[in-house]
Image (cartoon, rainbow, N blue to C red):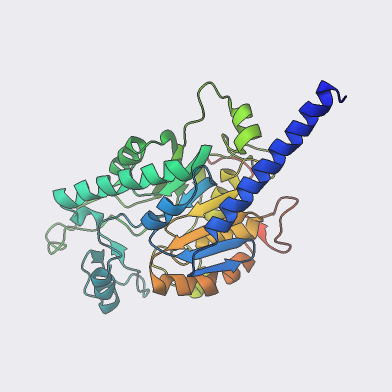
Amino acid sequence: MQSRAFWEKRLCALSKEGRLLVELLKLLLLQSDRDSRAIGNSRIVQRDCFDWLQDVPENSIHSVVTDPPYGVKEYEPDQLAKREAGSGGVWRIPPAFDGHVRSPLPRFTALDAAERARLVDYFRRWARLITRVLRPGGHVFIATNSFVAQMVYGAVAEGGLEFRGQVIRLVRTLRGGDRPKNAEVEFEQVSSLPRGCFEPWGLFRKPMLPKMRVSDCLREFETGGLRRCPNGLPFCDVIVSERTPRQERQVASHPSLKPQSLLRQLVFASLPLGTGTVLDPFMGSGSTIAAAEAVGVKGFGVERSAEFFAMAVKAIPKLARLNVPHLPLPAGSNASHHSLFVPEKCAG
């Protein structure tokens, strides 16, 4: 007759096999979309993320890093057509500066009360779907701006995610600082808004199970905390950043492309044990997925636009191969000759 210890060990092994089977089934479901591509260790799919998130198994995603369109109208076909034609629409076409043509920016100050209400509803519904698919303790990094941040943060919290603070990307943008429209000469000493010198990213977390500690969550779900930098220092909530370099914009001409030097830090921090899947439900041209590939983790991207999806297929491998000349990648990374920007200490 076998001992109790034998059967406990056998039961534990069976339980582990069962978890592995569940993980395999989840992965198969994630990869079942017809319009999907495998790129390295990652996968991308062309679908509306609201539809896709309803099909994904619960507790199957470890983290989210995303830069959403604000659910209003800037990426609707008619607005993109106006942007391409240079007629503006919701896209503000800035004047040339120092001989350089400036990229169009969405004018969030142009949103009326109904559009703001729509924005809040959009992110509330989105957060409910994200909460369902995230593992307990999974983190969400969401890009925003100083004008809409308060609306987005409130809506996402109402959708079920815990607000954990902000990550401030220090970068001098071309947003704000303009003289009053059509009265630039009359009021040349006035700016309508301050010139933007930072970009806020909301940091959220799916609630852990009742009475669960971070250490318990890490053991059971591989989530709950943030990964320290490769040099052992904690991840900081202020990142000295840069405008997206020209070489990256030449690879992917998406209007909201974020630099690899930023995204690689966020992706790296979002998976505390360096394992699991990071999701970008608003993938665009795939810069977050490229960052995942560069730091050696699995990414999953969802994009509804056929144009941007096709762009991502080509851009992700190229962006992932780009050298970001700062500190080397952590040990165990799959990207042999890339580098990861990690500051030696927090800003300030």
State the image coordinates of residue 333 (x, y, percent, origin top left): 71, 55
Quarter holding the N terminus is top right
Query: Is residue 100 or residue 267 the one in the foreground?
Result: 267
Say which residue appears at 61% left-offset and 46% top-offset: 22
Q: Between residues 179 and 284, which one lies in front from this camera angle?
A: 284
The reply to whether residue 259 is in sight is no
Residue 102 appears in the figure:
yes
Q: Nearer the viewer, residue 8 or 236?
A: 8
Q: State which quadrant residue 322 falls in.
A: bottom right
Q: Is residue 70 left or right of residue 279?
A: left
Q: Relative to residue 8, is residue 226 drawn left or right?
A: left
Closer to us: 64 or 100: 64
Residue 103 is situated, as x and y percent measured from the top left of the image, at 35, 69
In the image, residue 48 lies at what x, y percent?
38, 61
Is 253 placed above or below 67 here?
A: below
Look at 75% across and 50% down and name the residue there: 331
Task: State the residue lying farthest toward the front.
Answer: 1
Residue drawn at point x = 72 percent, y = 64 percent: 337
Residue 209 in the image: above or below residue 155: above
